[in-house]
Image (tube, grey):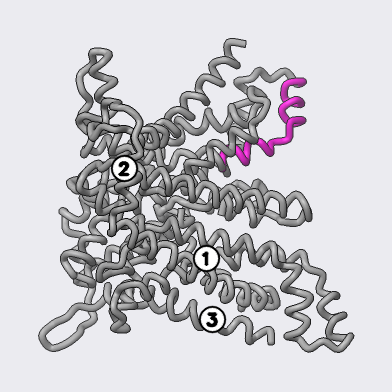
Amino acid sequence: MKKATLSPYILWSSLFIIVPLLLVVYYSVTIETPEGIELSLENFKKFFEPIYLKVLWRSIILALISTVICLILGYPAALILAGKSFKRSNTLIMLFMLPMWMNFLLRTYAWLTLLEKNGLVNMIFQAIGLQPLNILYTETAVILGMVYNFLPFMVLPIYSVVSKIDRSIIEAAEDLGANSLIVFLRIILPLSIPGVVSGITMVFMPAVTTFVISRLLGGGQFMLIGNLIEQQFLFVGDWGFGSAISVVMILVILVSIGFMSRFENEEQGGRLW
Amino acid sequence: MVMNFLKRFYVYILFVFLYAPIVVLMVLSFNNSRLRGSWDGFTLRWYIELFQDRQILTSLYYTIAVAVLSSAIATIIGTAAAIGIHNLHGFKKNLIMNVTYIPVLNPDIVTGVALMILFIFLRLRLGFLTMLLAHITFNIPYVILSVLPKLKQLNNNLYEAALDLGATPWYALQKVIIPQIMPGILTGFLFAFTLSIDDFVISFFTTGSGVSNLSITVFSMARRGVNPKINALSTLMFLTVLILLIIVNLRMSKDKNGKGGGNGKNKEISLGARDSSGGGGGLLRI
């Protein structure tokens, strides 16, 4: 009976999880020629043309910039929330999580309303006598959208690691004469690294694969790797090339996970998934 | 004191950054003016227009139909799978768990195009059925991950006692195991339902021929610029998903506090709920 309960899932996951991925790999390493289908690395070679490499490069750079901004904004926030400045930090953490649960598309769309030419941001800027800000459909808007969407992913893992630090370690350091700077540098910072690592992963991954933010806030002119995949499948119809880019994307993700997991400390429980 | 004030000030500034866009969107959905900058008085006009818009009503219908069906089917397959996985050990268990994590870890866009290739390869016409199959696929792992912690808390002796007293395995499953893991099953169902309502990227690639859900409709409207009707629709969608998620998370924290054994897994899921990313996809089907 125990086997019987598992078999529908085994069937389902083979057909809808394993086979599709194998198909992606299959299309990425074959090309259609007049004589039939041939094994070839042509699709990957195409990806390494300068024009497409630039897209990959841009995606990685924009995702990195957003990750760094999230880290700079989020790290202090996580420390403050884990500290004693607030009486109800649980409620505040809930409030940090709320926007994360809301539809990602709508959160991005909200910025479209704010940033457009006669949107609220420009109205306010004009009212206080500033130049109108025309950042919609620029890289700045894409970065803003990424930071806005993914900032909670940075704050939460760092918070959950820092709030678990044993107070007595800090007190011991203080008893031994450490000032708050030394306490931070020698205790809090090293102990928070697992949280920082999973924060970076959780921001970088969705940022590097997005195609919605770049489409809505970048106006289609700032093509990222996600947009390239979308275009190959929906408009160009070049499945081989689209699959090759998908394989590259999976590799980027796997490499990042592998790289990050070397820094992870199982016992600290900084992981969120 | 000053330091404390600065700290609080900093956190409040971040909250303004996180919430201002959403609040502005909601306020503007009641604005009588088409121009977003000026306030022309309170109106429910956009909501009324929203409910007269055929395209939006059709996509609302598809969203709910897919969400109900996919979460129900995923709950059945996922619960059965979790019971099976719970009884596995070693290599087999690792293998199946790793496969289960694939849709959770894969970027949404890759899951989306991979399923699209499969459906076209199988000569299925992209539409309602393919979107439903895709949603079931990405929902099952979340059901499994909600039910497994409950199975770990279960006392195995009860099941054996039932067998000793003459119950058939099927009867014991129904009367002993299922009632005890019910909270996990319900949480998984609600989770799957919410994810399904919220999904954009995977639906975008796996549907076709005029069938679209609300997210896809919003996307295609937003590409043509800002539209007050989307503000109204967004407000309603925000509130719906919010209420659902609050229910799910209240349930989860109750499970955790109540029985003391929810271990890390519950939290992992609730925090990793979305993005989504998406994807936002990204890693967590964030």
Q: Amino acid at mark 3?
A: Ile
Can you tell which mark lies on residue B101?
1
Which mark's residue is nearer the viewer, 2 or 3? 2
* Residue B47 in which image quadrant: top left
Dot 1 surroundings within 10 Å: few (below 14), some, or many (20 or more)? some
Does residue B189 sit above or below B232 in this rendering? Answer: below
Residue B271 visible in rendering: no
Tell me: B131 left or right of B263. Answer: left
Task: Give the labeled residue for mark 3.
Answer: A10
Q: In which quadrant of the rendered image does the N terminus of chain A lie?
A: bottom right
Q: Secondary structure at mark 1?
A: helix
**Region rendered in magenta:** A157-175
Place of residue B180 in the rendered image (x, y in percent of width and height, measured from the top left): 76, 68
Does residue B218 sit above or below A248 in this rendering? Answer: above
Residue B187 on the magenta span: no
Does residue B122 sit above or below A135 in this rendering? Answer: below
Residue B15 visible in rendering: yes
Distance between mark 1 and mark 2 Cα atoms = 41 Å
Residue in view at x 76 percent, y 86 percent = B169
Q: Earlier in the sequence, mark 1 or mark 2?
A: 2
Task: Give the labeled residue for mark 2.
Answer: B46
* Residue A8 in which image quadrant: bottom right
Place of residue A55 in the rendered image (x, y in percent of width and height, measured from the top left): 22, 51
Whether labels 3 and 1 share one chain = no
Q: In which quadrant of the rendered image does the C terminus of chain A lie?
A: bottom right
Place of residue A194 in the rendered image (x, y in percent of width and height, measured from the top left): 57, 44
Magenta-highlighted stretch: main secondary structure? helix
Tell me: B93 left or right of A113. Answer: right
Tell which subunit mark 3 falls on. Answer: A
Place of residue B269 in the rendered image (x, y in percent of width and height, measured from the top left): 58, 55
